[in-house]
Image: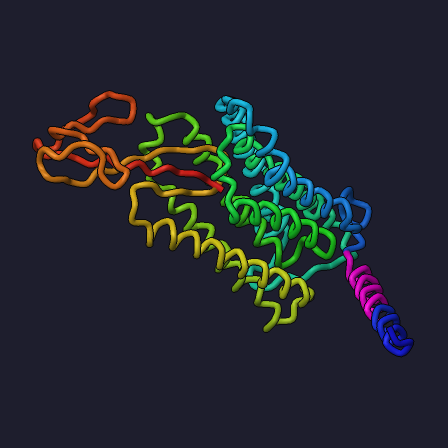
């Protein structure tokens, strides 16, 4: 290689390294001084390692480990876990509201960040603990692994869990309170509803038949992202002391999640034409059934769905639970696999 070319490469590498170092220093200067000594906060090495470890376990090591093993029965463990998650998220929902909009003097329009306000350390600390709980959400995927529900570990499921932890680290490092608090208020409420659903779904078919409102959880998640994008964008038009780069960061990440969940909703609830509908949220599989009329006397299997003769509709375990005017019914299973 000619000397001039080698010199150009070295110069280019030096320029890139200098640019990266300048960027790192600039980011450090923007960091929240209140959280710089919090565990896992500041230096991204630990959280990146944690997320990388999660991805390796759920996509590589976990499936290999469970390949020749029987699925574990974790029903009772999952029920306890979901109940604890309901209580934890209820606690955080109350604390976030009481230290912001319902007791902390927050503006409902535009709220800035005062990095020197000692009174703000309480809500920032709650944000850090909430971040820890979102790391604990990785257990959702571990339950899928141990129960050999590998198909439940979808792209949406893994990306969502990974980015939630990464986003939590970003905002606690650079500014967790202010306008962004509305996001965790809404998110903690969504998690209350979600884990309540998962707890009920784990109770079995006798309860699952009443869980028709599952798709509205996905709708709530979509609304969550849309509302927060609009809310967090207010500081772009009204100067209230909220850092603009946090607005750009929050809005772009929420838009990404919005696209993912809208795509999921369309493919799950709008375009689905077969009997099975797959939901990739949470940690437990629920089953719902619907029926559609067939020609009288039709029986056997059609398009992968069970057809019951003489109008008798079974509930999946051999028990007959109804007749409809002597007309044959086709049973469709709707498997709810949560994210």
Residue 100 falls left or right of residue 223:
right
Give whichever of 17, 35 is nearer the camera.
17
Residue 208 falls left or right of residue 241:
left
Residue 339 percent location from the top left of the image = 49, 42
**Quarter of the image where one finds residue 12:** bottom right
Q: Main secondary structure of the magenta part?
A: helix
The residues colored magenta run 15-31
Give whichever of 287, 12 is nearer the camera.
12
* Residue at 43% in and 36% down: 197
Q: Is residue 29 magenta?
A: yes
Residue 169 percent location from the top left of the image = 70, 50
Total marks in image = 0
The image's colour scheme reads rainbow
Residue 93 percent location from the top left of the image = 56, 43
Could you tell me which quadrant the N terminus lies in? bottom right
Residue 309 falls left or right of residue 115:
left
Q: Is residue 61 magenta?
A: no
In the rendered view, tell whether residue 329 sits above or below residue 217: above
Name the residue furthest bottom: 4
Name the residue furthest front: 1
Residue 56 percent location from the top left of the image = 65, 41
* Residue at 16% in and 27% down: 312
* Residue at 46% in and 40% down: 338
């Amino acid at each position: 290689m000619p000397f001039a070319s080698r010199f150009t490469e070295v110069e280019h590498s030096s320029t890139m390294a200098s640019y990266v170092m300048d960027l790192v220093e600039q980011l450090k200067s923007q960091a929240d001084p209140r959280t710089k000594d919090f565990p896992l906060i500041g230096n991204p090495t630990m959280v990146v390692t944690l997320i990388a470890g999660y991805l390796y376990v759920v996509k590589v090591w976990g499936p290999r480990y469970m390949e020749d093993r029987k699925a574990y029965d974790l029903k009772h463990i999952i029920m306890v876990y979901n109940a604890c998650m309901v209580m934890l998220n209820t606690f955080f929902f109350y604390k976030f509201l009481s230290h912001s909009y319902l007791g902390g003097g927050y503006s409902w329009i535009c709220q800035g960040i005062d990095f020197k306000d000692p009174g703000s350390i309480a809500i920032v600390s709650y944000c850090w603990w909430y971040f820890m709980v979102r790391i604990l959400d990785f257990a959702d995927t571990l339950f899928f692994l141990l129960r050999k529900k590998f198909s439940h570990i979808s792209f949406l499921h893994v990306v969502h869990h990974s980015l939630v932890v990464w986003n939590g680290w970003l905002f606690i490092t650079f500014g967790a309170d202010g306008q962004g608090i509305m996001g965790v208020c809404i998110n903690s409420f969504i998690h209350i509803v979600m884990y309540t659903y998962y707890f009920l779904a784990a109770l079995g078919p006798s309860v699952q038949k009443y869980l028709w409102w599952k798709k509205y959880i996905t709708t709530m998640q979509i609304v969550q992202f849309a509302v927060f994008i609009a809310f967090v964008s207010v500081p772009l038009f009204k100067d209230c002391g909220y850092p603009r780069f946090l607005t750009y960061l929050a809005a772009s990440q929420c838009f990404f999640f919005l696209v993912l969940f809208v795509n999921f909703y369309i493919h799950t609830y709008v375009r689905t034409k077969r009997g099975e509908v797959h939901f990739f949220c949470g940690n437990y599989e629920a089953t719902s059934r619907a029926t559609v009329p067939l020609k009288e006397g039709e029986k056997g299997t059609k398009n992968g769905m069970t057809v019951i003769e003489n109008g008798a509709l079974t509930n999946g375990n051999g028990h007959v639970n109804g007749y409809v005017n002597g007309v044959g019914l086709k049973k469709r299973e709707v498997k709810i696999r949560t994210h």
